Amino acid sequence: HEDANSWTGIFATLGIALSSGFASVYTEKVIKSQKSANDVRQNYSLAYMQVQLASVSLCIMAPWAIIKDFGPIIENGLFHNFNVAAFVSVLNSALGGLTVAAVLKFADAVLKGYATAISVVLTGVLSMFFFGTELNVFYVLGMSNVVISILMYSSKTLYKNVV
């Protein structure tokens, strides 16, 4: 049973990574290809478009919440048990989304991937110092992979300048 849960976790992680990568590249393509395509869209910022997308998700999730949890929402209110930890989590997600939007606007999806990889490495290293987490061989290999890939990505411009 534990082996099945491991495989489920591995496939879920791969699915998240693939869909996140695809979404980043596609979003970058849409943002950068429509810069000159439509004058009306140029008047709207990326944040405004994100609010539009969030409104669509609200229109989808609101009926689901009404169908599934109408009684408890009416009885206890919409924000019942919404404590400080939940608020911090929502705020973190919102700021993360705005950060990703800024990265995609001013950089590209590859740099976003590297920034994510660096944050994972730093999280591991800092958790080792602050919480005593032991980093195994696989984590060290992953950190090495991240550092080498960043050096290789950066060396493209270095090679152009040298040659």
Image (cartoon, rainbow, N blue to C red):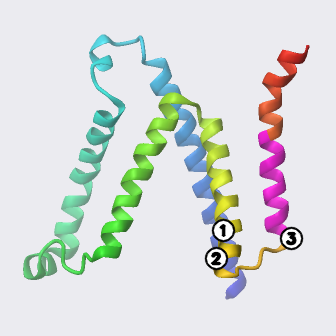
Mark 2: amino acid: Phe
Mark 3: amino acid: Val
- Please state the extent of the stretch shown in magenta in the rendering: 137-150
Name the disc covering residue 126, or none: 1
How many numbered discs?
Answer: 3
Q: Earlier in the sequence, mark 3 or mark 1?
A: 1
Residue 75: % across, % down: 8, 82
Main SS, magenta region, reads helix
- Marks 2 and 1 sit apart, C-alpha to C-alpha, by 6 Å
Magenta stretch holds residue 141: yes
**Element type at marker 1?**
helix
**Element type at marker 2?**
helix
Is the C-beta separation of discs 2 and 1 under 8 Å? yes
Q: Which residue is mark 2?
A: 130
| In the image, farthest residue toward the bottom | 1
Name the disc covering residue 137, or none: 3
Q: Residue at x 69, y 86 (%)?
A: 2
Q: Nearer the viewer, residue 80 or 69?
A: 80
Relative to 78, say whether 35 is above or below. above
Magenta stretch holds residue 128: no
**Element type at marker 3?**
helix
Mark 1: amino acid: Leu
Name the mark nearer the viewer: 3 or 1.
1
Q: Is residue 129 left or right of residue 67?
A: right
Residue 104: % across, % down: 51, 34
